[in-house]
Amino acid sequence: MSRENVNVVLVHGAWADGSSWSKIIQLLAAEGLTVVAAPLPLTSFSDDVAALDRALERLTGPVVLVGHAYAGAVIAATREEKVKGLVYIAALAPDEGETVADIFYRGTPHPQAPKLSPDNHGLIYLPEEAFASAFAQNATDEEQAVLAAVQRPISPACITVPVSRPLWKDRSAWFLVAEQDRMIVADNQRFMAERMQARVRSHAADHTPIVTAPAAVLDIVREAVAAVAAA
């Protein structure tokens, strides 16, 4: 199969929207790939999985799903048969029976990780100063300003529900470890990647390599696309 027949679906995490993938979208589309950024409402875990499934319904042919951060849990919850590979970018990968919060808070947090709590509407926003200190410390001032301006809050209902059997138990998976991540520390990422028997790559990146280290993200996505095309 030609690699141009493989669809790439990019899924954003908490405190982000599809624009966080803009650098990746432009470069993959220039290579002739069909690229979709699936929008998550971040209102509940089931809502997010349903939104991803609606995006997948629009596509024909095999799909490589790419999830950043929280979206790692979401991409593993779909049961869409056309998904042939999963790529985790500094992402969370809870196992069956675990919640996103369980794995997010596993181990010792980075000393600069922000303290998070719901607001008066029950939604969790990332403190604005955390974009520079922990979320995207390697980004430019302009990139941090955009990330802060477009952030989408996440509901606790997204992170407190035990997940079912994750799709990474039944599909090939790749994992890009962000070695300078202050939100999900690298040791936690390596634990998840090894547990899921993913093909692991690492890079000296912050929590947002999709913004600050796009070449590393492109390399691992291309690797997954090539493997799915060859299969």
Image (tube, rainbow, N blue to C red):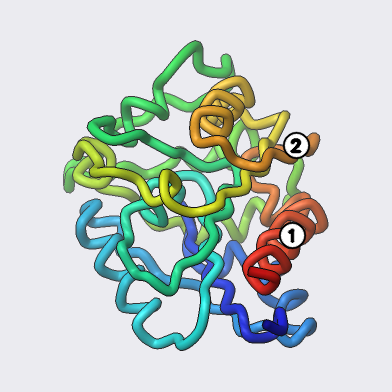
* Front of the two marks 1 and 2: 1
Foreground residue among 161 and 127: 161
Foreground residue among 119 and 111: 111
Instruction: Name the N-terminal-most of marks 1 and 2.
Output: 2
State the residue position of label 2.
202
Mark 1 secondary-structure assignment: helix
Identity of the amino acid at label 1? Glu
Mark 2 secondary-structure assignment: strand
Rendered-image quadrant of the N terminus: bottom right
Mark 2 Cα shell of 10 Å, populated few (<14), some (14-19), many (≥20): some
Looking at the rendering, which quadrant does residue 136 occupy? top right
Q: Position of residue 45 (x, y in %)?
A: 24, 52
Rendered-image quadrant of the C terminus: bottom right
Image position of 151 (left or right of 221): left
Q: Position of residue 221 (x, y in %)?
A: 69, 61
Q: Residue at x 37, y 44 (%)?
A: 125
In the image, residue 184 above or below residue 25 = above
Give residue 223's mark: 1
Looking at the rendering, which quadrant does residue 4 occupy? bottom right
Q: Residue furthest front?
A: 231
Q: Residue at x 72, y 30 (%)?
A: 179
Looking at the rendering, which quadrant does residue 202 occupy? top right
Q: Is residue 142 visible?
A: no
Foreground residue among 181 and 54: 54
Q: Position of residue 105 (x, y in %)?
A: 40, 22
